[in-house]
Image (spheres, rainbow, N blue to C red):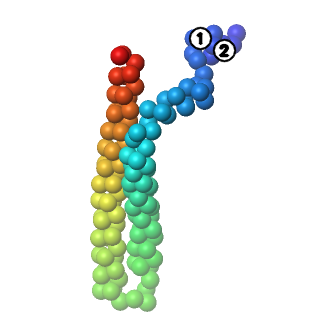
C-alpha cells in the first residue's frame, strides 16, 4: 500500500505560495544579499586552508631550499592558515547573524499581518 502526500494531509509547496512568502522578504533583500556576500567570502576564506596545506607539504619536501628558509616559509604559511580560519569564522558568524535577523524580521511582518 502506498501513500500519497495528499492522503497524509501534506500540501505541496506551490510556486504561488512561495511568491506570496517572498513578498515578506522583499523589504530585507539588501540584508539577505549582504548576508550571501559575507557567507561567500567566508567560503573563499575557508578554501585557503587546503591550498596552504599543500604549499606546506611542497615546501617541506623541497630539499633544494635551506632548512632555515623552509622553516621561515612554513611559519609564514602557518600564519596565513590561522588568519584564514579566523577570517572564515568571523565572516560566517556575521553572515549568519545578518541573515537570521532579516529572516526573523520577515517572520515578524508575516505574523503582524496575519494576526491583525
Give the quarter of the figure containing the C terminus: top left
In the rendering, at what x and y percent does residue 62 appear?
44, 83
Question: In the rendered image, which residue does mark 1 sit on?
Answer: 8
Horizontally, is 104 left or right of 10 in the view? left
Q: Which mark is residue 4?
A: 2
87 or 105, which lies in front? Answer: 105
42 or 49, which lies in front? Answer: 42
> From the viewer's perspective, is residue 102 above or below residue 44?
above
Q: Are marks 1 and 2 in contact (CB under 8 Å)?
A: yes
Whether residue 57 is visible, yes or no, is no
Horizontally, is 108 left or right of 5 in the view? left
In the rendering, at what x and y percent does residue 54 appear?
45, 70
The residue furthest front is 116
> From the viewer's perspective, is residue 5 above or below residue 65?
above
Circle 1 SS class? loop
Q: Quadrant of residue 98?
A: top left
In the rendering, at what x and y percent does residue 108 appear?
34, 28
> From the viewer's perspective, is residue 90 above or below residue 84?
above
> From the viewer's perspective, is residue 115 above or below residue 53?
above
**Gap between marks 1 and 2, in whole Å?**
7 Å
66 or 30, which lies in front? Answer: 30
Tell me what residue is drawn at x 54 percent, y 30 percent.
Answer: 18
Q: Quadrant of residue 51?
A: bottom left
Q: Which mark is residue 23?
A: none
Tell me what residue is drawn at x 36 percent, y 28 percent.
Answer: 109
Whether residue 29 is visible, yes or no, is yes
Circle 2 SS class? loop
Amino acid at each position: 500500500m502506498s501513500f500519497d502526500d495528499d492522503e497524509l494531509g501534506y500540501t505541496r509547496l506551490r510556486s504561488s505560495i512561495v511568491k506570496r512568502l517572498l513578498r515578506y522578504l522583499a523589504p530585507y533583500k539588501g540584508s539577505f544579499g549582504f548576508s550571501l556576500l559575507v557567507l561567500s567570502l567566508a567560503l573563499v576564506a575557508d578554501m585557503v586552508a587546503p591550498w596552504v596545506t599543500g604549499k606546506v607539504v611542497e615546501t617541506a619536501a623541497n630539499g633544494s631550499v635551506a632548512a632555515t628558509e623552509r622553516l621561515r616559509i612554513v611559519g609564514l604559511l602557518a600564519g596565513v592558515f590561522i588568519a584564514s580560519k579566523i577570517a572564515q569564522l568571523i565572516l560566517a558568524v556575521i553572515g549568519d547573524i545578518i541573515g537570521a535577523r532579516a529572516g526573523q524580521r520577515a517572520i515578524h511582518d508575516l505574523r503582524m499581518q496575519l494576526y491583525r
